[in-house]
Amino acid sequence: MKNMLLTKEASKEKLRGGFYTPKEIADFMLKWAVNGNNEMDILEPSCGDGIFLQLIQENNIQYSSLTAIEFDEIEYEKSLNIGLENSTIINDDFHNYCLNTEDRFDLIIGNPPYIRYQYFSKEQQGLASQIFTNVDLKYSKLTNAWVSFVVGSSQLLKEQGKIAFVLPAEVLQVSYAKQLREFLAHFYNKINIVSFEKLVFPEIQQEVVLLLCEKNETNSHKIEHLELKNASELKNLDISKLENPQKRIDFKSNKWTFYFLEQEEIDFLEKLQKSKKVPKFGNYADVEVGITTGSNPFFTVPLSTVQFYNLEKYAKPLVGRSVQVPSLIFTEKDWLKNRDSEARTHLLSFPKMKDLNGSIGARDYLEFGVEQEINKGYKCGIREEWQIIPSQKLSDALFIRRNHLYPKLIINEANAYTTDTMHRVNIKNDTNLKAFTASYYNSLSFAFAEISGRSHGGGVLELMPSEVENIMLPYHESNEEIVGKIDKMIRSNKSIDEILEFTNKKILIDNYKFSKEEVDLADRIWKKLSKRRLNRD
C-alpha cells in the first residue's frame, strides 16, 4: 500500500495535513465522547503525533479496546512508543483499513488530514471512491481526504456510536460537501457543531469546527451550533449542553451556516424558500465567471505598458479589481480615473500571430511573454495559440467574487471587460437592468448571499456563479427610481446600515409587503452572519 503524499513532499498550503490538534481541543472532544463510559471500543483513524492517545493515557481513560491508524511511518512509531495498553497501532492508509476491517466501534475520534484529491495516488482515489459507493454517494475530484474519513468512519460505527472530528469549516458550506451534509443529517440522530470566533490555526487561515455526531437508533434528527470565542473556552464548557440539540435538521441540505441562526430565523428563511414569494437572482440574469486570461499580470496592463509597446489596437477597457469599483454603477468616468492612476485598466486581446502584420510593439511584447514563459503556463499552454484569450464577452453587470463588508452587484455602464475576480452578469429578456441592480441592495438578498457563499480567513465572502443565481432577489420595476440614490449614498460613504434602512422600506415593505418585523428579522440574520465572518479579520 503506497503512503499518502506527506507534508514534506508538498507544501503545507496545498496539504492541510500537517497541523496537529491543540491539546485543549483534543481534551474536550474526549470528554464529550467518553462521558463516563469506560467500556468503549475506540478508533483513531489518523493518529498523527498521537495527541488523543497521549491524553487517553494521561487522563487514565478506561476502554475495552483501542485501534489507531497512521500512514506515515515516523508518526506511526511515535504513536507506538506511547505504549498504550490493550491497543493496536496499525501502519496503513485509513481508506484501505476501512474497506478491509470487520471491526466496529463505539467511538471514532480524530483530526483527519486535509489532502486534496489530486495528491492521492490512483490506488487511493479508487479506495476513497469505494467508501463513497458503499453508501450510495458520488465521489468527485473536488473531494478532500477529510470527507472520505468522515464517511468511512461512519460505516465503522456500531448501531449506537459517536464520531468526533476536527474539520475545516468548509463542511458547513462548500458545495462538494453538500452530499456529506445530507448523509450526516440522515445517518446521525444528534449533531453538534462547535465553532470559534478566532482562528484555531491562524498560520493557515483555515477556520475549523468540531463535528460531534451520535447515532442512537431513534427517528429523531436534531442539530445544534455553538460558537465560542476561542479554543481555551472549551475547558469551561459544560458538555451536558450538547446532550440535547434542539434545531430540526433540514433534509433539503441547505448549507449548515443556517444553524448559526436561531430556530425563529431558520423558520423564517425556510418559509420564504417554500412560499417562493421572492424570486431568485437567476430568474432575471445568467451569471458566469469572468475572463480567464491565463496570466493576469501579462494580459492586464496599465496605460503606460499600452503606450510603451504601442498596443492601443489590442487594448480593451478592463476592470480587474474590486477596489477599482467605487459604487453600484461603474461609469466611463470611473474607468478613466482608474486608467489615469496607472491601475491595470486594459485587457490585451491579441489576434493570431499571422495577423499581427506590422505590429512591432505587439511582437516585442509577446516575445517578452515567451521569455517569461507565460506561454508555458497551464491555461496558455492548452490553447491553439497561447496569446489568444477565449470567451472575451462583455456583460451588463458585474458581481464581485470575493467580498468583504457586503457582496456587490454593479452595473457595467463603462462596458469594461473583467477577469475572473468578478463574475459576468447578463440580464434576461424584459428585465430592467437598473431595477434589477437596485432590487439586490436589501437585507434579505444580503442574508442569502451570506448563506449561499462561503467565508474564508480574513473575513472574505466568496460566491460562485451558481451560488449568486441562488440569492433571493425581490425584483420590482419601480426600483429603477432608487438606483441613482443608492449610487450616490455609496459614493458619499454612507454606512451600509443607512443605505439598507432606505432600500428595505421601498424594496421589501412597499413592493413586497413584508412587515417591519420580518424586515428586522432579515436584517438581523444578515448582520449575524456577516459579523461572524468579519470577526475573523
Image (cartoon, helix red, strand yellow):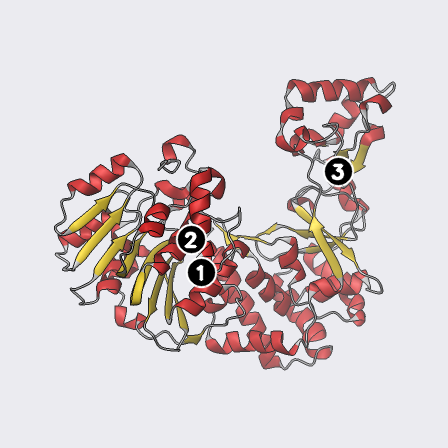
Task: Examine the rendered structure and indicate whether residue 352 appears above or below residue 221.
Answer: above
The type of residue carrying mark 2 is Ile
Label 1–label 2 contact, CB within 8 A = yes
Label 1: few (<14), some (14–19) or many (≥20) C-alpha neighbours in 10 Å: few
Q: Is residue 76 left or right of residue 286?
A: left
**What is the CA distance from the residue labelled 3 to the residue labelled 1?**
40 Å
Number of the label disc, if any, that sits on residue 135: 1
Q: Which residue is rendered at x = 39% and y = 78% of the image?
A: 219
Disc nearest the viewer among 3 and 1:
1
Q: Which residue is rendered at x = 77% and y = 66% of the image?
A: 482
SS assignment at label 1: loop
Label 2: few (<14), some (14–19) or many (≥20) C-alpha neighbours in 10 Å: many
Task: Examine the rendered structure and indicate whether residue 536 appears above or below residue 508.
Answer: above
The residue tagged 3 is 390
**What is the CA distance from the residue labelled 1 to the residue labelled 2?**
7 Å
The type of residue carrying mark 3 is Pro
